[in-house]
């Protein structure tokens, strides 16, 4: 039952000609589906409407031929075929009573145009904002009229297929912001100069779109408040003035801050709601509805924010990926069931680099259509009268046991050798700034507790005989992995001479410390582990050298929008970074290696922490699998290996693997994932 | 008429049950079209068959679910829908009498699987070969049987839609090579150990595929000879022994060398045919037909190679992109018409990073379907009785004048201010190692010479009055761009204090030299210009510092497979590289800037070369465009701006822009590219 303090979140609100049924609003965000995978898009967004989000938006919709985003995926809205591709999504959102929103977009100088080969356009001629290509030309008045007509054309297409909320999109440094920004806009005509001039392009576009569809649709716009956008941004005073100018044309203001890495800041660097110091200022400038994000997952905080009047809607991208049913769970008072976003930005890495969104918390995110996975429903097993033993309560084991429990197996035992569940997450969450990653454990702990058919047993290490005697007919081994303590490195597949028995992340997190003041952390992993260990040791006063064969420290963190902040932070806390170095040998008092140019390199250090390569802990599995007769004699009909023990991988993929096996356990060959349903092109 | 010395190139050759009509063979290479754009693929490959290539292959076809290459584009062959997508390509190739080939593939540890979320497989458990993900698991015997069955299934699909040549693909470090390689394969079972063991997977797969389709199709395989593949490769002696073992199962051996950056080596680092020192050894091991590549464009060299018996077919990827009609031109004795590959690898950058192949020489490459462009045919203008003045004979101007000439305009004048045509290419081709880029000029010079309706006038700088008086009804301005000599930088959009009048690439290439021994070359461009200038100055004895705000030197060169070789080369010739540095000021005897962490940075140098930003040379155009009445009075009905003068860009895009305008000149709005034809999904 809903907590009455949260009732304010379920009040409807008028935006232009439309009524939003509640205050939960999934803001526009990329998915990798765009208009290229219409049914995947429809299922992904439809689930959110089903989960109670009153407004659900798709990603950016380039309106013009010279706003080409290929090879990235976007929800193009330029012709009837584009429109047809998005229609199933609108229908899926409407099916659950939510409003559907679309983000009409032109990137201007940020548009790729590498595939279309169009010349990039911008308010003023300049070097290109993005790597690919070289420059943008100044828009002439014909370009301005053409792009505005494209916005209107796209708006009509959107209206005609049923979109309720149509954005004229300005945020994230795209064309409308480029006109507003004195850094980008050096025009001397009516579209430059004073704020009124720089705002003209956006205001005219809003007006034309409003004239065309304003009776039928709510007109939204999204702009960013200053934040850390630096020289490229628009001062907050000017943005507030712009809001005042735009107010008569706008039904909903969607406000962000600064650059994308700031706006979608990870939990490592930004607390929830960090954007408010900027975004809350918009209320001064308008009485129209306002929405903003803050990675909010706590309904008390949400209700307070709405009550304060700073926002009218709670915007969310990442929390809605981690838990599409967040609103419904609040409505039903099931607060402990909320699967809280960790702020890892794995979703962004997957969407940007893989063109397929996913989630470290929610293994069903992005799998709604192609695997027919629902975040809240799992098929009950046809043969419930079975016992399953899951060995190892790391990310894969926890999720597997939980999902098997939800599927109704008679008895599921999750047996963990250490004193607590969580596996590598038990120490990952204690790395500096990674505390929110602990939510992956916390949510599963709560859920496991609620299932009568699942028993969690900690502090018990099983050997082969224990497993054979256990009495479970199905055994799932999820014993994880450990970091090589001999420095076996991906680049050479060989150990580092003299490094056997060196410190590893697990040992440091268990309390072992370097034997001396100066320590090298050798990172062949390129993500968060080595920087975390380095930062922890630096905070304790060690002289820390982060050494990596990569050209930059932690290249994977660029995919999560953290790279620049991470490297800056490591630098600021005094960690020396050595890139392009392959270590070959450890000697007393030094490490020896070579540069990317094969020049000799060495560093005087007292100790070495190796973050080189994860080794599967699959001994138990291999011993069990070696004798199928013995298994049969013990009544074990199926033996499976999942997660890092099968093959070390990201936490998101280990969670996925545990979930997948549990879903597909009754298929003929559950160790190999079932075929994916193909999307249907329009 | 064909030179009789080249007749050997037009002899047919038997490969298994099929007859190749001649010795020209477009080897498998990626395009970005795969099975995702069936008609684009069909048009792209069909043009090559039309141009005389006797064998035409598509790109890699992943056969298994765990060989997922998304978000890259591949020609999947796993079910009937995949097959249907490739059928138009087979038909297009057959239409012109060529044989169609397909490359059945499993990447093993190199497979991405980031979108499918399959666990990566490999002969032995190991860290992942690619950035995304973390590791690969050891294939068990079920995996081996499954993948081999997938090869057979894909082979049957290929046969059924008419492919003539079916590869069991081993090269480029993929699964078959991983089994062969002692670095990858640490197995102790029958699939590891001795060469016979390591070869077993490949030989069994070849045998199964042969059993299934060997009566209907030629069975090809592709393997790499040692080269510079280093520790990961297979020693050449073992590969030759493998060829002997495989011979009874194989109808065509396709041989490559080392790593991809070596096999597709750019002209900067590899001469034509550099692979032969390795690939020619295969003849010792087999009497079956052999094909290999060498970026050959010279028919004398090709004929000699066939006559030598080292190869039976001339393989080509890049030369067939630069000139799909290369074989026909040789057959017709039109050697001067061959559009020779420059070895820039822009095709690879476009295919890999943009997922759409293109070419620096051939503006129609990749445009066959969506723009209906044929490389050898342009539509004759409906209104030939017009004169066109093209001002500026750089890449855009040359190509525009040439294409207008081919379209039959009565008079086309290409007027160039300097003493020779070529624009920025006149100095680019003189940068160390970039000589082959001069082919962009050379080919156009030859072609322009042959057109009676085109006049090339050099050494004449036109001002506004000259243009108005010229007598041409259509004026195309292609006056190029120059490098900012004030250091206006993309990252700040501001000049560098005190740097006005500094050296630029053009000035250095015109003979100006630094005023002192120590010089900084400041690179905000990130491609070939700054490294070229640095190398040139270093060769003359200057102490050269290459300074860049980028995290690595010349990141764009990674897209052309040159990055590692380029940086290694710069290091080896003694150029100091400073990355992550933003220059703020030039002072006498030093340059001042800051690091990526905003720490102060400075360097004592005597002079500075600025490679920061290209500025359009559009003064003439703007002066002409400012007074439309005056234009009308002068009888000028149309004025266009193309290439760098419109917006500075890559050479490939400038050539494209000139070509496009010439093709679309008679459309209502030729300054904005005509809409693209959409591909039809199957």
Image (cartoon, coloured by chain):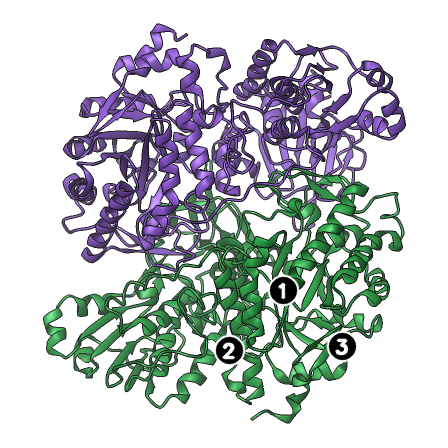
Chain colours: A green, B purple
Q: Nearer the viewer, mark 1 or mark 3?
A: 1
In terms of sequence position, does the residue under pointer 2 or pointer 3 come before the other?
3
The spot of residue B23 in percent (x, y) is 31, 20
Judge from the rendering whether residue B473 lies leftward or rightward of residue A565; answer left or right.
Answer: right
Q: Residue at x 56, y 61 (%)?
A: A86
Residue that numbered label 3 is attached to = A310
Question: Which chain hosts label 1?
Answer: A
Residue A226 can be seen in this image: no
Dot 1 and dot 2 within a common chain:
yes
Q: Is residue A414 above or below residue A136?
A: below
Q: Earlier in the sequence, mark 1 or mark 3?
A: 1
Pick whichever of labels 1 and 2 is earlier in the sequence: 1
Residue occupying image coordinates x 47% and y 32% = B565
At which x and y percent is residue B416? 72, 15
Mark number displayed over residue A28: 1
Read off the chain for label 2.
Answer: A
User: Would residue B84 appear left or right of A544 to someone viewing this image?
Assistant: left
Query: Residue B420's spot in the image, x, y percent?
Result: 67, 12
Q: What numbered label is drawn on residue A339?
A: 2
The quadrant of the picture occupied by the N terminus of chain A is bottom right
Position of residue A193 in the picture relative to residue B454 (left or right): right
| C-alpha distance separating marks 2 and 3 | 26 Å
């Amino acid at each position: 039952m809903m907590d009455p303090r949260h009732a304010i979140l379920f009040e409807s609100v008028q935006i232009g000609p439309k009524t939003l049924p509640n205050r939960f609003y999934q803001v526009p965000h990329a998915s990798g589906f765009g208009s290229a995978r219409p049914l995947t898009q429809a299922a992904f967004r439809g689930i959110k409407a089903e989960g109670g989000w009153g407004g659900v938006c798709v990603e950016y919709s380039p309106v013009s031929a010279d706003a080409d985003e290929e090879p990235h995926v976007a929800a193009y809205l330029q012709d009837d075929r584009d429109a047809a591709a998005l229609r199933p999504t609108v229908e899926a959102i409407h099916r659950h009573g939510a409003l559907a929103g679309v983000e009409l977009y032109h990137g201007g100088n940020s548009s790729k145009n590498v595939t279309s080969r169009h010349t990039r356009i911008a308010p003023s001629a300049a070097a290109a904002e993005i790597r690919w290509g070289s420059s943008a030309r100044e828009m002439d008045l014909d370009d301005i009229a053409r792009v505005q007509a494209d916005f209107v054309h796209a708006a009509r297409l959107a209206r005609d297929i049923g979109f309720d909320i149509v954005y004229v999109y300005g945020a994230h440094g795209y064309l409308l912001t480029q006109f507003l920004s004195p850094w980008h806009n050096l025009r001397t005509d009516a579209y430059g100069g004073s704020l009124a001039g720089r705002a003209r392009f956006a205001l005219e576009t809003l007006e034309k779109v409003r004239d065309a569809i304003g009776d039928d649709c709510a007109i939204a716009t999204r702009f960013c408040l200053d934040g850390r956008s630096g020289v490229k941004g628009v001062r907050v005073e000017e943005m507030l003035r712009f809001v005042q100018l735009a107010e008569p044309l706008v039904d909903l203001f969607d406000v962000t801050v600064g650059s994308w890495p700031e706006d979608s800041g990870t939990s490592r660097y930004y607390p929830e709601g960090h954007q408010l110091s900027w975004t809350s200022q918009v209320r001064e400038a308008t009485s129209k509805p306002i929405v903003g994000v803050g990675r909010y997952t706590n309904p008390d905080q949400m209700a307070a924010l709405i009550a304060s009047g700073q926002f009218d809607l709670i915007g969310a991208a990442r929390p809605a990926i981690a838990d599409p049913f967040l609103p419904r769970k609040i409505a039903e008072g099931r607060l402990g069931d909320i699967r809280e976003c960790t702020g890892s930005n794995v979703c962004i890495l997957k969407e940007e680099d893989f063109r397929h969104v996913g989630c470290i918390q929610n293994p069903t995110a992005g799998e709604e259509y192609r695997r027919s996975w629902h975040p809240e429903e799992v098929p009950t097993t046809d043969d419930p009268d079975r016992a399953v033993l899951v060995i190892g309560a790391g990310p894969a084991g926890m999720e597997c046991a939980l999902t098997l429990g939800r599927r109704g197996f008679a008895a599921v035992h999750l047996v963990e050798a250490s004193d607590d569940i969580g596996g590598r997450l038990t120490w990952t969450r204690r790395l500096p700034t990674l505390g929110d990653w602990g939510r992956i454990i916390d949510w599963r702990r709560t859920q496991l507790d609620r299932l009568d058919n699942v028993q969690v047993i900690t502090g018990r290490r099983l050997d082969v005989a224990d497993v054979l005697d256990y009495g479970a007919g199905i055994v799932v081994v999820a014993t994880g992995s450990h970091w090589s303590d001999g420095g076996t490195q991906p680049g050479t597949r060989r150990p580092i001479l003299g490094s056997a028995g060196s410190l590893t992340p697990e040992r440091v997190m268990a309390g072992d410390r370097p034997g001396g003041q100066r320590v090298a952390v050798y990172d062949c992993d390129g993500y968060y582990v080595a920087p975390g260990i380095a930062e922890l040791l630096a905070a304790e006063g060690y002289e820390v050298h982060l050494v990596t064969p990569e050209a930059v420290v932690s290249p994977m963190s660029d995919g999560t929008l953290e790279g620049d902040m991470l490297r800056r932070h490591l630098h600021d806390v005094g960690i020396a970074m050595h890139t392009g170095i392959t270590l070959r040998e450890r000697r007393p008092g030094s490490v020896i290696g070579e540069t990317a140019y094969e020049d000799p390199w060495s560093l005087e250090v007292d100790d070495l922490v190796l973050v080189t390569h994860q080794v599967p802990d699959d001994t138990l599995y291999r011993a069990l699998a070696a004798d199928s007769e013995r298994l049969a004699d013990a009544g074990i009909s199926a033996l499976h290996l999942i997660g890092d023990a099968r093959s070390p991988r990201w936490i998101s993929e280990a969670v996925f693997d545990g979930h997948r096996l549990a879903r597909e356990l009754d298929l003929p060959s559950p160790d190999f994932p079932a075929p994916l349903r193909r999307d249907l092109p329009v």
